[in-house]
Image (cartoon, grey):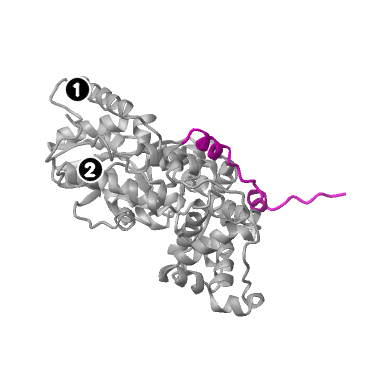
Amino acid sequence: MSRTTAPRSRQVIDLPLDVRTQEKAITEKARCVEDGRLATYRPDGRNVERFLALLSRRMNRQLAVSFTGCVHCGLCADACHYSLAFPDDPQMAPVAKADRIRKIFKRHIDWTGRIAPWWVGARRPVDDEDLNELKNVVFGLCSGCRRCTLNCPMGVDTAGLIRFARGLLTELGIVPEGIFNVSRDQWDTGNQMGVSEEDYLETLAWMRDEVRAELGTDTVDIPVDKEGCDFLYVINPREIKFDPRSIGQAAKIFHLAGESWTMPRWGWDNTNFGLFSGDDALGAFVAANAYDAATRLKAKRIVISECGHGFRSTRWEGYGWAGRDQDVPSESVVVTLFRWLEEGRLRVDPGRNPLPVTFHDSCNIARSGGITEEPRRVLARVCADFREMTPNRTENYCCTGGGGLLSMAEYRPVRLEAAAVKARQLEATGAKLVCTMCHNCIDGLTDVIKHYGLDMKVVQILELVDAALVL
């Protein structure tokens, strides 16, 4: 008797809701849980009612257009790396994922679904199991890369609908544990990795001493809370916790360029899990920390280290979440580096980076951030052998770790299976180094390289510029 294996999407959709770390946070009296900023799951049978109330309250014109504009042409399937990796699984197509929430919209809000639900496929969730299935679709089968959005002929923002659904579920505590844990850290410590102020300051001092030893001068500094500087530098907590070399490289380059700069004691995290969880309140809190630091320290601008979603959140989305004007300009550190190279403030020798290099465009920087040319112009100046990846720029494929997926261990197997598309793209370049301007992409690409046994290493632009410096 033959046995039929469930489609890959079904295996993910059936994963259970795990709330053990939520229960731990309640036991430990986590501050953000105690004061209600971070919701936990309540098994009281009223979550569908709460979900529908939130759906109505959060609806806006942009979302309604994307809910109603889809004509189910299926072109989005050709843009999605999940759909391309699983061509025989229709539930992997972006339109099928969006239909999970679109059916609820039609039944609860749209007039066609309220009058003739059978005609338009409208359907309300019945219980928490239905909401958990939706959780597994919007968190586990989409990296929010927005490639489908960019390629939709009707202008439907499927990634926006996915984030909207994530936000509703986050308010009910129906979320993956990784999303809950990182959100808890960011609410309670101001950074997504729970780095203490002591560890932060010690790491900065360590990197300052390393650069001083390398350059043989004590005039190099990594200032903290210095007022009136040319720019405030904000970073990804991964740089403090796992790989602080980028901080030292930045300090060295900033010193050689001759601009005054500082890092803030509070408000230094440029990442923002509100973008991934759909929690606009968390997004506002984290973004405002950086904006307030720049204002408090009278910095002329904010420079954002190499981080994809950190750039998108701090440069673009955060102002809207926080209801703030862009009264302090902000830019990616790669834009800063490009300007300094053009002005002749940094002397470089591309021969010091002889290995073939390709560039991975971070989704949040290229598709959602508008930066595609500056990194290429920097790499052309500091590398001897640059090779384009195909496709590239706004059409590049996700590193597969976007959307917070690196924090959600339960979805790792399907993420890496879907990464076959990315692996083929990387291998075709023949490059030995893949450069990206995103710490999240470093981990995503490293996972892909290890899983598929590619002969490549991931580097960042600061690292290559540092290696090419002529002192």
Quadrant of the image occupied by residue 385? top left
On the image, numbered disc 1 is attached to which residue? 212
For the residue pair 195 and 407, the one nearer the viewer reads as 195
Residue at 49% from the left image edge and 67% from the top image edge: 56
For the residue carrying disc 2, how many other residues have a C-alpha within 10 Å: few (<14), some (14-19), or many (20+)?
many
Q: Is residue 417 toward the left or the right of residue 202 in the image?
A: right
Can residue 410 be spotted in the picture?
Answer: yes
Q: Do the residues labelled 2 and 1 touch (CB within 8 Å)?
A: no
On the image, numbered disc 2 is attached to which residue? 293
Q: Which amino acid does label 2 sit on?
A: Ala
Q: For residue 25: magenta?
A: yes
| Spot occupied by residue 231 in the image (x, y as percentages of width and height) | 17, 42
Quarter of the image with the C terminus is top left
- Judged from the image, the secondary structure of the residue bearing numbered disc 2 is helix
For the residue pair 358 and 307, the one nearer the viewer reads as 307
For the residue pair 164 and 76, the one nearer the viewer reads as 164
| Spot occupied by residue 101 in the image (x, y as percentages of width and height) | 56, 63
**First of labels 2, 1 by sequence position:** 1
